Image: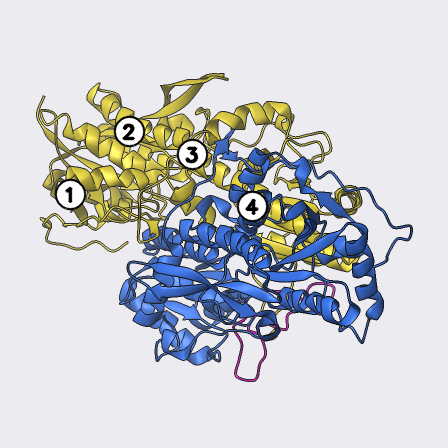
Chain colours: A blue, B yellow
Amino acid sequence: MAIKNAFYAQSGGVTAVINASACGVIETARKHPDQIGKVYAGRNGIIGALREELIDTTEESDDAIRALMHTPGGAFGSCRYKMKNLTENRREYERLVEVFRAHDIGYFFYNGGGDSQDTAFKVSQISEKMGYPITCIGVPKTVDNDLPFTDCCPGFGSVAKYVATSTMEASLDIKSMCESSTKVFILEVMGRHAGWIAASGGMAGKGRGEPPHIILFPEIPFDREAFLARVEQSVKDCGYCVVVASEGAQYEDGRFVADAGGKDAFGHTQLGGVAPSLANMVKQALGYKFHWAVADYLQRSARHIASAVDVEHAYTVGQKAVEMALAGKQAVMPIIVREQSSPYRWHIGEAPLSDVANQEKKMPIHFITDDGFGITEDCREYLQPLIEGEAFPPFENGIPKVAELKHVMAEKKLKTPFEV
Amino acid sequence: MAIKNAFYAQSGGVTAVINASACGVIETARKHPDQIGKVYAGRNGIIGALREELIDTTEESDDAIRALMHTPGGAFGSCRYKMKNLTENRREYERLVEVFRAHDIGYFFYNGGGDSQDTAFKVSQISEKMGYPITCIGVPKTVDNDLPFTDCCPGFGSVAKYVATSTMEASLDIKSMCESSTKVFILEVMGRHAGWIAASGGMAGKGRGEPPHIILFPEIPFDREAFLARVEQSVKDCGYCVVVASEGAQYEDGRFVADAGGKDAFGHTQLGGVAPSLANMVKQALGYKFHWAVADYLQRSARHIASAVDVEHAYTVGQKAVEMALAGKQAVMPIIVREQSSPYRWHIGEAPLSDVANQEKKMPIHFITDDGFGITEDCREYLQPLIEGEAFPPFENGIPKVAELKHVMAEKKLKTPFEV
C-alpha cells in the first residue's frame, strides 16, 4: 500500500477535549509511517482544505502534540461551514480533489458533530463519484451529546462535570445567603435542542430536595405557572431555589423562553438569555431577590475541570479513527459503546456516516421525572460514569498551561485561490 | 484567666475560601481549651446572635472541621444585615449582651468585608459602653479585594484565579471559532465599585495583543466610541476580541452600562447585565457575531479552582484572629502584609477595626494602562502571587466533596425570641 498523507480538521463548536482527539489522530498516525506520511491539519476546518491552508503537523514536536491532551479550544481552528450536495455545488468538491491530489492526501478525518459528520459523509462520496480515492472517517465531538448511535459524545462528559460542579458550588453559596438576601439562583447552560447538559446539573445533588430544585429541558414545554409554583414551594421548603435552565427551554408553541420580546433604549430587540428572562419572571411574580449566571463558552472550554473519562473517550475516538482508516474502513465513525455503568465498561464500535448525519438524539423521556423538573435514577446511572475522574492540566504562573503550536503552513501548490 | 466561649460568624457575600477561615478559627480555638471553651457559630451571621441561634461546633468532628478547608459557600450561613449605631438601636446591643451572657461568650470573631467589620467594631463598643467585657476581632474576607490596609483580601485570590483561567480557556474557544463564526466574547465579572476582579482577567494573557483585548473597570468612565473602536481594531488585528467587563462599569455621569434601559414584553424594566448590554452595542454598531457569559456566583464559589495562596491566607487570618484575641488585642483585624512579590513573601499584621470599616480600596491608577483598557506590569506583579498554586478539593462521584456538618444548635436559654 502506498504511503498517503492525511487531512484532519476540527469543525463546529469546540469542546474542552476536542484537542485530545487531535492528539489521538496525530499520535496514532505517527506510529504508522509505513502507511501515513504527513498529517495536515486544516486551518479552520474544511475551510482550510478549500483554501489550501494546511498546517503541517510534522513540524510540531511530540511534546507539543501531547500537550493537546490538556488544551481546550480547537488548536487548528474550527469552522461553521455546511457543504452543499455534490450536485448543488460541484465546484467545492472539485476544489477538494485538487487540493487532496496536490498534497497526496488519501485519508480524511473530520472531527465534529452532526453537521460535520454530514460534511464527512459528503466528502466520502468523492471516491465513488469523482474517481479520487480517499478514505473518510468521522471523529465524533459535541458538548450537546446529541449524536445518534454513540452512547455519549466526547466533549459532553467534561461540560457535564463542569455544570454539576458549578451547580453544586453555587448552591452552597446561595444556601448561605438566603436567610437575608438572594433566594433564587438561575444557571443557564447550553443545549439548544437537547437537555443533556441541563440534566447534568442534576448531578450536583441527590434529588429529594437537594439542589438543583428545578431543571428546565428543551424537551419539556415550559409552563410559566408550574415553574413559578415550584420556585415558591422550594423557597418555602428549603429557603432557596436553584434552577438549571437549558438555553433551549421553550413554550409549548415553540417560542424560546429566552426570547422575552424585550427592547433596549434604542428600540432594538434585546438579545437575552433564558436566565435573565426567568429571573425577571420570578422577580415580577414572587418578588424574590435573585442572581443568575450564564456559563456560555466557559462551560465548553473548562478543560481545568474536564472529566478523565471524557478525555480518554476523546483520545480513543481519534486513535480508533486512524486505525479504522488503516483497516480499510470507509465512511464510518467510531462510537462509544457502553457495556455497563457500574463499574463503567465501554468499548469502541462504529456507525456509518450516512446514518449519523443530521440526526439529533434527545433525552429519553424516562430520564426526566414525571413533573418535568428533574432527572430520574436511570438518568443518574447514565450520567455518573461520564463525569468520573479528574484530569487536571499542568499549571504555570497560576493558570493552566496549554499547547504552543508552531502552525507551520504547508507550501501552497495550486495557482488559484478559492473564495469560501 | 477564666475560660470563655467564643462566637464566630460569617457575613456578607461568601467566598470559595471563607470556610478555610472558619477552620482556622475553630482549629486554633481547639488548641487552647484552657482559655476558650466552646466555639459557637452564629447561624446566618450576626442574625444568629440576635436570635440566639448558635451552632455548637464542638459537636463537629476534627475531620468535619478540616473539610471546611475545601468547602465553598458559608458553612454556617451568612447574612446581609447592617447594625445601626448603639445610640440608634440600643435594643439590638442589649440583646447581644443578653445572648453573650447567657452563653458565657467572651470572644467575638466576625468574618466579612467592610460592612461586616463595621459591625464587628460596633460590637466591640459593648465592652466599654455597656460594661460587658467581650474581645472582638475581625476576620477579613471579600472577593472584591476592597478592604483597606490589607495587601489583599482572602477570597480574592481564588476568584482572580478562576477569572484568569476562565478568560484564558474561553479565549482559546473563540479564537478557534472566529474565522467563520463568533468574533466577540464578553465575560462579565463581579466588582461593583472596584475593578480588581476584572483586572485579574488580564492575567489570562501577557498583554501585547493576547486576550483579553479589553478590560472595563468601574474606575475608568466607559466611553462607548473608544470601546467600539477598540473592539473593531482587535477583530481586524487578531480576528477576534475578548472583553472582560466589571459589573460596575459606568459612564462618566455614573449611569451603569448594565442599566441599558430596556423593557420586557410586559413593559417592565429589564434587569440586565453589563455583558448583554455590551453585546447589543457591538451587534448594533459593528454587526459582529458575539457570545457573552455572566459568571456571577460561579466565580466566587469556584473552590475547585481556588488559589493555594488564597486558601493559606484565609486559614491564617482565622488562626491569627484567635491568637490576637488570646494575646489581649481588642477591635483589630489581622491583615496580609506583603514583603515581596517574587518570590512571594508575606506576614500577618493588624489594623484597627475603627479605621477598616466603610472604606473601599479601589485600583491604584498606575495599575491601569493609559488607554484605560488593560493592566500594567505593576498590576501583574501585584496579582501574580495571589493566583499561585492549586488546592484542588477531593472529589467523590465526579464532583468535589464538601464538609458535612451536623449543625447541632445550642439550647436556647432566653425566654423571649427576637425579631430581626
The amino acid beneath tag 4 is: Cys
Q: Does B192 appear above or below A222?
A: above
* Percent coordinates x, y for residue A394 in the rendering: 47, 35
Other residues around mark 3 within 10 Å, as few (<14) / some (14–19) / many (≥20): many
Q: For this rendering, which residue is in front, B81 or B130?
A: B81
Residue bounds of the magenta highlight: A247-272
- Taking the view exactly as shown, the residue that stands out farthest to the top is B339
- Residue A68: quadrant of the picture: top right
Which residue is painted at 66% across and 34% down in the image?
Answer: B374
Give the chain of mark 4: A
Residue at image location 32% in from the left, 28% down from the top: B317
**Which residue is pictured at 64% across the width and 60% down the height?**
A12
Give neighbour class at mark 1: few <14, some 14-19, many 20+ (Cα, 10 Å). some
Residue B218 versus residue A87: which sits nearer the camera?
A: A87
Label 1 – label 3 distance at C-alpha = 26 Å
Q: Which residue is mark 4?
A: A23
Query: Do circles 3 and 2 both sit on a common chain?
Result: yes
Earlier in the chain: of badge 1 and badge 2, it is 1
